[in-house]
Image: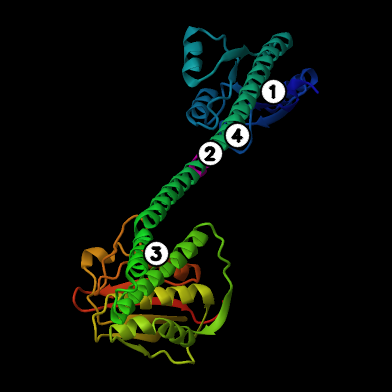
Amino acid sequence: MPADQTLKILIVDDNPNNLFSLNELIRSNFNVTVIEASSGYEALRMINEQAVDLCLMDVQMPEMDGFETARLIRTRPKTAHIPVIFITAFDPNRSLMEKGIDAGGLDYLTKPIDDVQIVHMLNMYIRFINRERNLNAELEEKVRARTRDLVQANFHLRNEIEERKKTEAVLKQTDQKLREAITAKDKFFSIIAHDLRNPFNAVIGFSAILRENLHELSTEKVSQYAGYLHEAARSAFLLLTNLLDWARSQTDQIKYEPEQMAISEIIQATFSVLSGESTKKSILLLNKVEDSVSVYADRNMISAVIRNLVSNAIKFTSRGGTVTAYAGTSGGMNSFTIEDTGVGIRKEDIEKLFRIDTKVSNPGTEKEEGSGLGLILCREFIEKNGGKIHVESEAGKGSRFTFTLPAGAG
């Protein structure tokens, strides 16, 4: 298929005979589409409605001559690129040629038209137009290819940026977990090196006294030292229990096995286990949680939470005080509070209670020692069961530790 097949040439002349002759001459020599206009106005309308590649324009036409028509074609952005060749019956003198150039014309043909001349001229312009089309097509293809490359490069760049962001996020998480692991390790060794050693030192010391002086000690003294041994052994046992639970929690070795259960039963069992400590300090333990109040949680984890909270409450409550457990509800969750009438907590220490990277461990009202690990364990176990834990306290006015748990599955 010849390259010039799709070209469209517009002939503008008010003389029908001239239109016919030019039309026949062009179509017999070139494979192009020829359209005709009999006036400047009609030419402007046709150019506005369809794409035209070349225009042959008669100069002498009524109403609007060829120069004015060409000038209007050139002033419109949509049609300014169309080459215009003027056809005139006059010799194109210098003045006429300048007028034609000012109007936007590119060349002249004179009447009567020389067939060889017009074919030669049209052949030259058609080759030029086709060459320009080919160059434009090549340029457009290069632009499209470059655009595709840029789009693809942009896509890969965005993916790379997203991957880098993900990698940075993973690195930050890994760094945070590593810091937490280091802090946990330091905490673990600190407890082993100091807190766990203290009760064993007491056991060793008092047992040595009993062994070396048993026959010289009164029954009252033996009973007193036996009490110290019991307290030291109990303290070591509770600390070891928390240490093991915490270590298993850090390594995800504790199975989460939730069930529907009554909290009142666990609280009462905890009160019974710790009744010896509360009786020794004449502390009243009150369970105000009704048997009908239940939660969906892991029994072992919640037992450890309540054991730690009640044990702390007894430790920081003076003789003759009270430790009370009661329940409430809030938005599909049940809340439980362990409240004491003890010494309370300083405001600056409250925010540190549940953090592994700080240590808040004050002696109890009768010098009972602790590691601060119990409350950290409480927070982890409560959060594993879908709840939250917080404390309200004021120095000298007691404390209220409240945690929430789902009322039911789902």
Q: Which quarter of the figure has residue 117?
A: top right
* Residue at numbered disc 3: 376
Residue visible at 64% across and 36% down in the picture: 50
Label 2's element? helix
Q: Which quarter of the figure has residue 349?
A: bottom left
Label 3's element? helix
Examine the rendering and report whether any part of residue 298 can be seen: no
> Residue 389 in the image: x percent, y percent?
38, 72
Q: Which quarter of the figure has residue 360?
A: bottom left
Label 4's element? helix
Mark 1 vs mark 2: give the one in front.
2
The answer to which of 159 and 365 lies nearer the viewer is 365
Q: Earlier in the sequence, mark 4 or mark 3?
A: 4
Q: Are marks 1 and 2 in contact (CB under 8 Å)?
A: no
Q: Are marks 2 and 3 in contact (CB under 8 Å)?
A: no
Residue 296 within the magenta-colored segment of the rendering:
no
Q: Earlier in the sequence, mark 1 or mark 3?
A: 1
> Residue 15 in the image: x percent, y percent?
66, 26
* Residue at numbered disc 2: 158
Mark 2 vs mark 3: give the one in front.
3
Residue visible at 33% across and 83% down in the picture: 278
Classify 10 Å Cα crowding around label 1: few (below 14), some (14-19), many (20 and above): some
Q: Earlier in the sequence, mark 2 or mark 4?
A: 4
- Separation of disc 1 and disc 4 at Cα? 56 Å
Residue type, label 3: Ile
* Residue at numbered disc 1: 18
Residue type, label 4: Gln
